[in-house]
Each structure stands twice: as C-alpha cells, then as structure tokens.
C-alpha cells in the first residue's frame, strides 16, 4: 500500500504502531523520530525506514506549508516475491554485506535520498494525485518493485541492510507477537508458548532480535511510552503508570528515575518549562541530524 500523507497542524509527539514495515520519503517539512533520549532530524529529501512495532514521531509543518510525506507499506511476503522476481528476471544481486552497530539494533534508519530516488518520489507525488492510480493494485505493485530495485541495487547502506533483512517471515511473526503484548501483564512462559518455542529457545531468539533480555526490553519500551504520555497528555502520574502496565505508582517512579535520573514529575516539569521558555533548561538528549535539500 502506498500513501501520501499531509499534516497541516503541528500535533506534537505521537505514538505510531506499525504491523508492517514501511519506507517513507519527506516531501516537505521536518520529521523527528525519537529513540530514548535521542532525536533524529529528517528534512526534505530524506528517505527513511520504520520497522514493525512502536515509533515515536513528530511531523512539523514549516513556513506556512503542511508537512508532507509518502509511505510504502510492505510485508516480508511482498518483499520476498519482488526480490525473487528481480533476481530471476534481471539478475539483481541480493548479497548483503553491510555491517554496522548503528543500524543493527535500530528500528528505524534514515539517509539523504540519491538522485534516482528523488526523481522516483517526485513522480510518485504526481501519480498519487491521480484518482486513476489510487487503488490500482497492479500499478502500486510496479512502483513498489521499482522502489525496491532502486534501494537493493544501490551501494551498501543501513537502508539497504534493513530492507534485505525483512525477507524473514518468521522474524516478522515473532516480532508482531512481542509488540502486541508490550502493555499486557503476561509471563514470559506464555509468550514463549504464543511463539511456539520452548522457554530456552524463546530467550535465545529474543536476544537475537532485540539484543537484551525480555524483562529489561519490556520495561524500557513501557518507560519510553510513559515519557510520551508525560509530555503530551495531562494524565496523572498514577494513570500513566497504570496505562504502561506498571504494577503500582511507586514502582513506576522508581524505574523511571533509574532509567532517566529524574522522577516523572520532574521530567514533565522540565519539558513544560522548555516549551514556555526554550532557554530555561538544557535540552534532554542528543540530536542526530540528517539533512538533504532537493
């Protein structure tokens, strides 16, 4: 599925849950993708990848113009079918030799688009304005094939690495089960059963996908979501702790302070202070800038 997305108002940080992989392109405005205390900045002309699961994003219109992007959604089965066709019909080399710590554990990556991709998304922008194109499955499949070819035939990069690693259908099913239970009080033994694995096999597979033990990963994901609720809603600390599946408020506060060195109340206060007076407090975290001007 291919979607052209427009946001005319700045709606702040939002939680986005994906059940499929996505490749997107910023047509206009600025996009922020949050990961813990780091914020990646995506400007016009940037192509990005989003994995299955939760993402914390902020789309910012600029200069009285709306934020605009194009998104391609796909499943491992879609990708496998297209790559097989490109390999058989055109001899596309599907070797993936890219290795780097930066993208190995990341659920999103971004980079400036090269000229052929810029031209591709410019034509897609025109096509998505055409009523005859929208909903035409064959036309969408052709454009998806073209996009995958442009990425897979390009030089080694984090984007290409993420794309080629999505062929594993079993990986998708495993990840979908995990992400579907982030905010549920469910024992690891039950998760192992739901993924058709023994407890030992489940723990090994979990580490292979997420690089840390299950309990630590689930706590981290819940704390990240609690931060979003603290700065984007007026819910009480206890309400947020409960929504993020912490057994009681004191336990939530203790874990939050251990992870971020401040209590939830202080974290919210600092954010509100920075919103009203940016010079009042130091910004939390680092920014990773990705800029590409057309």
Image (spheres, helix red, strand yellow):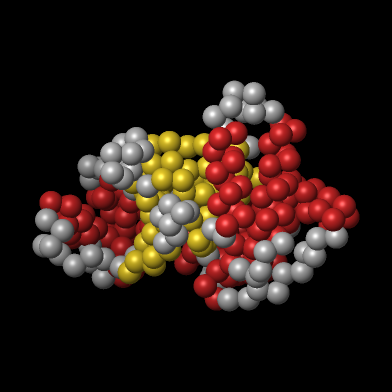
Instruction: Estimate the x, y position of residue 250 in percent, counting from the top left.
Output: 27, 58
Quick one: 232 or 42, which is closer to the camera? 42
Residue 81 picture location, percent across and down: 80, 48
Residue 15 in percent (x, y) is at 41, 46
The reply to whether residue 107 is visible in this rendering is: no
Q: Is residue 238 left or right of residue 173?
A: left
Q: How many marks?
A: 0
Q: In which quarter of the view is residue 154 placed?
A: bottom right
Q: Relative to residue 158, is residue 130 depicted above or below?
A: above
Q: Locate residue 123: give its quadrant.
A: top right
Q: Residue at x 17, y 52 (%)?
A: 275
Q: Residue at x 33, y 43 (%)?
A: 61
- What's the residue at 66%, 69% (across, down)? 155
Residue 93: give x, y in percent of width and height. 80, 65
Q: In front: 289, or 180?
A: 289
Q: Which residue ends up furthest to the right in the rendered image?
A: 88
Q: Nearer the viewer, residue 258 or 19?
A: 19
Task: State whether residue 153 appears in this view.
Answer: yes
Identify the residue at horizontal 30%, vertical 68% (top origin). 285
| In the image: residue 213, left or right of residue 39 | right
Q: Is residue 14 above or below residue 282?
A: above
């Amino acid at each position: 599925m291919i979607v052209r997305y427009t946001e005319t108002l700045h709606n702040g940080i939002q939680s986005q849950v994906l059940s499929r992989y996505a490749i997107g392109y910023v047509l206009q405005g600025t996009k922020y993708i949050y990961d813990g205390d780091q914020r990646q900045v995506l400007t016009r002309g940037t192509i990005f990848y989003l994995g299955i699961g939760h993402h914390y994003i902020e789309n910012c219109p600029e200069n009285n113009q709306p934020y605009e992007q194009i998104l391609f959604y796909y499943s491992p089965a879609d990708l496998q079918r297209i790559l097989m066709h490109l390999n058989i019909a055109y001899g596309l080399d599907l070797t993936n030799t890219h290795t780097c710590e930066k993208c190995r554990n990341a659920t999103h990556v971004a980079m400036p688009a090269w000229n052929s991709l810029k031209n591709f998304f410019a034509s897609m922008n025109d096509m998505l304005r055409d009523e005859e194109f929208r909903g035409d499955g064959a036309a969408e499949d052709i454009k998806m094939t073209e996009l995958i070819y442009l990425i897979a035939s390009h030089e080694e990069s984090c984007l290409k690495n993420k794309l080629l690693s999505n062929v594993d259908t079993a990986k998708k099913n495993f990840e979908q089960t995990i992400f579907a239970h982030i905010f549920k009080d469910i024992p690891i033994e039950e998760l192992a059963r739901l993924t058709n694995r023994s407890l030992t096999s489940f723990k090994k597979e979990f580490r292979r996908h997420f690089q840390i033990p299950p309990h630590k990963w689930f706590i981290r994901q819940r704390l990240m979501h609690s931060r979003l609720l603290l700065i984007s809603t007026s819910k009480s600390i206890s309400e947020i702790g409960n929504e993020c599946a912490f057994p009681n408020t004191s336990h939530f506060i203790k874990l939050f302070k251990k992870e971020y060195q401040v209590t939830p109340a202080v974290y919210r206060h600092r954010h509100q202070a920075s919103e009203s007076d940016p010079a009042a407090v130091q910004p939390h975290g680092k920014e990773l800038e990705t800029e590409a001007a057309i």
